[in-house]
Amino acid sequence: MPPRHLVDLADLSAAEIRAIIGRASELKRRRAAGDKPPLFERKVLAMIFEKSSTRTRVSFEAAMIEGGGGAIFLAPKDTQLGRGEPIEDTARVLSEMCDAIMVRTFAHSMVERLAVCASVPVINGLTDRSHPCQFLADLQTYVERRGDIAGRRVAWIGDGNNMCNTYIEAAALLDFELAVASPVGYEPGVLRESSADSRVRLVRDPREAAAGADLIVTDVWVSMGQEAEATTRRAAFAPYQVSAALMACARADALFMHCLPAHRGEEVAAEVIDARDSVVWEEAGNRLHAQKALLEFLFGYAG
């Protein structure tokens, strides 16, 4: 049986996503009770990092350790990737030694090329195009707090980046409404590449996007690799800060999410991220549980 990969969220069906989230919540409850089942006994995860990380690295590494397996951190400068070894050759070599490969990188094509040549599951830990693992943790957080996201209204405020692209994929898969508010020139790439799903609206006014929303999500204005654009980006995004006034446009019980790290006073006001309806710390913590459930799911298909 060929391995299952998570290159984009659409590699999973809606039923599979919901099953993974249900399992993640179960594993979370068991862990809180002191039960850490040996899900990954003698399994090894290779982790390739071209981008720095806190939550992705710690959640995957902790998941493997708690499950009785292990994880190997690989930075290009410390491996033959840094000396020009083709990614296809790396995929084949790691497949001989490890049970899965997770990669956090810039170019989405790197994950796609790994998945073509690897004989073990390949997981997108983040690319410039998408961030499916983070969305799984976001969804787990929403479901635990508010129930199924189907039929709900979600507002994405700010840069049309990798997380925004993944929310657009998710809206079609999980049947929720998504309003994206981005400045001109910073719209999400997946909307520029293809016709928008009927569930997704692109607007300019963040208040219009936030109106009646059950969930408001944002991200940094300047991502890794965009430092040279920082001044221009901050000027363009200044009207898109998630403030208390913007949150007031949403439903009274609306949640606020941010994948972190956050810059208080830029994309989000301190009074919002530190407020009662901000669930960013649960969201971050759920990376561990969602990662466990995802790994278990992919290993199940790998035999």
Image (cartoon, rainbow, N blue to C red):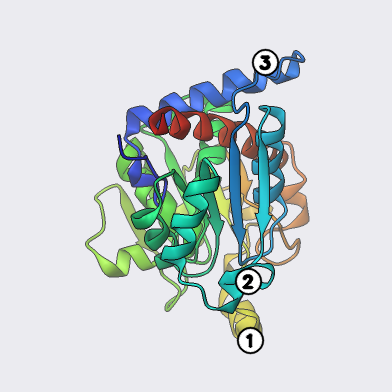
- In the rendered image, residue 199, in percent from the top left (x then y), is placed at 29, 47
**Residue 41: quadrant of the picture:** top right
Badge 2 is on which residue?
Answer: 224
Quadrant for the N terminus in the image: top left
Quadrant for the C terminus in the image: top left
Q: Nearer the viewer, residue 254 or 303?
A: 303
The first of marks 1 and 3 along the sequence is 3
Query: From where the camera sits, is residue 303 visible?
Result: yes
Badge 3 is on which residue?
Answer: 30
- In the rendered image, residue 261, in percent from the top left (x then y), is placed at 71, 57
Query: What is the distance, in whole Å, between disc 1 and disc 3 at their CAs?
Result: 45 Å
**Residue 240: quadrant of the picture:** bottom right
Determine the secondary structure under disc 1. helix
Identity of the amino acid at label 2? Answer: Met
Q: Relative to residue 278, is residue 2 drawn left or right?
A: left
- In the rendered image, residue 184, in percent from the top left (x then y), is placed at 42, 77
Q: Relative to residue 173, is residue 62 drawn left or right?
A: right
Q: Residue at x 75, y 65 (%)?
A: 265
Identity of the amino acid at label 3? Answer: Arg
Q: Which mark is residue 228?
A: 1
Determine the secondary structure under disc 2. loop
Q: Residue at x 66, y 17 (%)?
A: 29
Identity of the amino acid at label 1? Answer: Ala
